[in-house]
Image: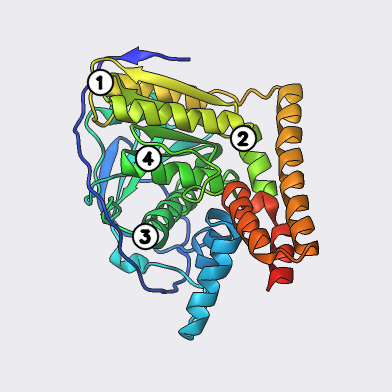
Amino acid sequence: MSRRFARTGLPLAVSGAVSAMLFCAQPAARADAPASGQILTDVIFSRYTEHSDNSERARRLLSPFSAARLERDLGRSGRTLTGQPVNLADEKFVVYLPALRPKSGFGLLVFVPPWQDARIPPGWAAAFDRYGIIFVSAARSGNDESAFDRREPLALLAADNVMAQYPVDPERVYIGGFSGGSRVALRVALGYPDLFRGALLNAGSDAIGSREVPLPPRDLFLKFQSTTRIVYVTGERDAAHAAEDMISLRSLHRWCVFNTDSQTEFRAEHAVAGAAALSGAVRYLLGDAQTEPHRLSACRSGVDAELAAGLQDVEALIGDARRAEAQKRLIAIDERFGGLAAPRSIDLATRLQ
């Protein structure tokens, strides 16, 4: 499905990555919501949960081989993977509280920006007021920051803290982003379908089932296939990102993810979505996931058959003492199937060692 909207917005993008240190803290108590319809700036949260723990993120967001390699690398320097990646006392967020509070609870959109400051894009507040959605975004979470060490955990911490402090409907929790932040949003949505029910991908996307965007463990991926809604919003004149959207969308369908929508913002270039485009995307996210049991079952069977054949090939190569070929084939399986291939892929890697 494709739709068009008039546009307003700001084009912004940067690139790069850095690392972070490990800290721990105690969770904060739930607080009453202050008056609605306001922007809260320089917000400091204090609640940590398992979602943002380094080992849990490695389990969900990295392929099994990548997670094992990271743990080995840390072990060589006397460190462990367990712990929190950021000190929340040093982090600041912006929170928008909408004028409307639905009876079922607020919706929530966690936004990953490409820029460094914490702000709400122009024109977006009206849509959040209309649909009763809280907006939250972290500072120092732009493209210059490490996705694994900062951008991903900051998004998870933002969601957990807002849900702890305000009456949020867990069935209306979403993640989104613009440009490079949109790519991070897709990764987090893929790894955390039990937290986020959908993702808004604004002018930035990747194919899933790759070295860059590995599939999560099987139980999480089955949930992602069944319940997560993905909506793409990209400018009509942003040809490069529109082409990437098509590749990303095809990869979702290839991996049996069918709750998707693609929307085009009329006359827009590479710019954050305008108010009308945002409203159209939010309307899609608020809808119910539509599953076609027979189509989903047939697609999953095809994926399982392909994976089983690949693992069987590795078994045969090991049996024939063709260890180098088996290793190469197994790495390719880990990059393509990620958590779907575990624990058998891990067992085969152990045999090769």
- Residue denoted by label 4: 182
Q: Nearer the viewer, mark 3 or mark 1?
A: 1
What residue lies at 37% left-to-right and 54% top-to-bottom? 151
Q: Which residue is mark 1?
A: 237
SS class, disc 1? loop
What residue appears at the point 73 percent right and 33 percent down from the top-left corner?
Answer: 302
- Mark 4: few, some, or many residues within 10 Å (few <14, many ≥20)? many
Is residue 50 at least partly visible in the picture? no
Q: Nearer the viewer, residue 56 or 315?
A: 315
Q: Nearer the viewer, residue 170 or 218?
A: 218
Nearest to N terminus: mark 3 or mark 1: 3
Q: Earlier in the sequence, mark 2 or mark 4?
A: 4
Q: Amino acid at mark 1?
A: Arg
How far apart are labels 3 and 1 at the CA level? 31 Å
Q: Is residue 24 left or right of residue 124?
A: right
Q: CA distance from mark 2 to mark 1?
A: 28 Å
Res 271 seen here: yes
Q: Is residue 118 left or right of residue 227?
A: left
The quarter of the picture where residue 149 lies is: bottom left
161 to 304, vertically: above or below: below
Q: Position of residue 288 (x, y in %)?
A: 59, 24
Specify which label sits upstream in the sequence, 1 or 4: 4
Find out whether the residues at labels 3 and 1 contact each other: C-beta distance under 8 Å: no
Q: Which residue, given by chain and number where applicable, does mark 2 sit on?
A: 255
The residue indicated by pointer 3 is 150
Residue kind at label 2, given as amino acid type: Trp
| Separation of residues labelled 4 and 3 (CA atoms) | 15 Å
Q: CB under 8 Å between callouts 2 and 1?
A: no
Closer to the N terminus: mark 2 or mark 1? Answer: 1
Residue situated in front as seen by the camera: 148 or 25? 148
Find numbered disc 4 in the image and state the secondary structure of the residue it sits on: helix
Measured as percent of width and height from the top left, residue 25 is found at: 44, 72
